[in-house]
Image (cartoon, helix red, strand yellow):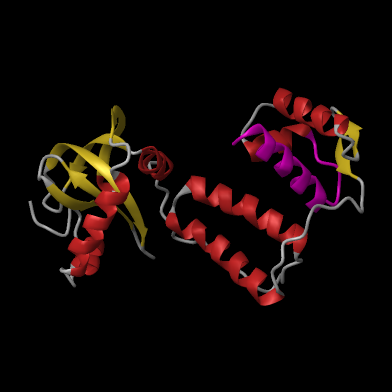
Amino acid sequence: MRPTDRLFEVIQILRGARTPVIAARLAEQLEVSVRTIYRDIAALQAMRIPIAGEPGIGYVLQRGYDLPPINFDTEEAEAISVGLSMLARTGDAGLKRAAERAARKLNAATPLSEALLTSSWGAPDLNLLPEIRTAIREERALQVVYEDDTGSLTRRKILPIALIYYAEVAVLAAWCRLRRDFRHFRPDRMHECTPLDERFDGEGGHLRQAWEASRSTDPDASRLARQRSNSTKTG
């Protein structure tokens, strides 16, 4: 998280708190050190943000301090809130944390209903997903050890281009150097997943277009991607 984004998050957390928030709790939520929180609080106070408190006691934000509003009506805000909450079902811890930050910003502008609830019961815990999303953004190749539906392991170099979040599983679409074709991989079947120095800068968009075209000619691709451990094409 960029320092400017973190400062905004500190304000959002304090705005939503009913009691003083200690630095350790802020550090845990933002995944930084307590010393970093002390520096952030000092920086915000230097910018004349009305934060009161001190180490060991906690911090509070003066009531009435406001940020620019977000122009959503109530139903729009509730729809976004439910959608953000449902991201916990993906098993992607990074997206879940980002959704919680976004929900705090939304709630600060538009108080949301407490009657709309979602459940993450039974959601998988897929620690690889944040790393895979980063590789997609950076257009970076991955080296994976993958277990197919027969239990066989293969080592592959892949170019990740898209993540598909189904209700029951996540699926990674990628160009497979071993098969020389597009394949769909389930992250929960990956025994290893290592980002490589190799990049495919500027190719991601073209690969996604080609992948979408291949899906449009295979009406069973989405169903098979969910059901099969390996890919929409065998082998």
For the N terminus, the image quarter is top right
Give residue 175's position: percent from left, percent from top.
20, 46
Give residue 136's position: percent from left, percent from top.
36, 43
Visible residue check, residue 118: no
224 up-or-down from 74: above or below? above
- Residue under the point 50% across and 45% down: 94
User: In which quadrant of the rendered view does residue 9 lie?
Assistant: top right
45 on left or right of 218: right
31 on left or right of 151: right
Give residue 212's position: percent from left, percent from top.
25, 61
Task: List the single residue furthest toward the left.
Answer: 235
Of residues 6 and 31, the one nearer the viewer is: 6
Task: List the single residue furthest toward the bottom.
Answer: 75
Give residue 111's position: percent from left, percent from top.
76, 66
User: In which quadrant of the rendered view does residue 129 lie?
Assistant: top left
Answer whether residue 18 is magenta in the image: yes
129 up-or-down from 69: above or below? above
Task: List the single residue furthest toward the top.
Answer: 35
Of residues 44 and 71, the one nearer the viewer is: 71
143 on left or right of 78: left
Of residues 136 and 26, the one nearer the viewer is: 136
Q: How many labels does the image show?
A: 0
- Residue under the point 54% across and 66% down: 83
Secondary structure that dominates the magenta span: helix
The boundaries of the magenta stretch are 1-22
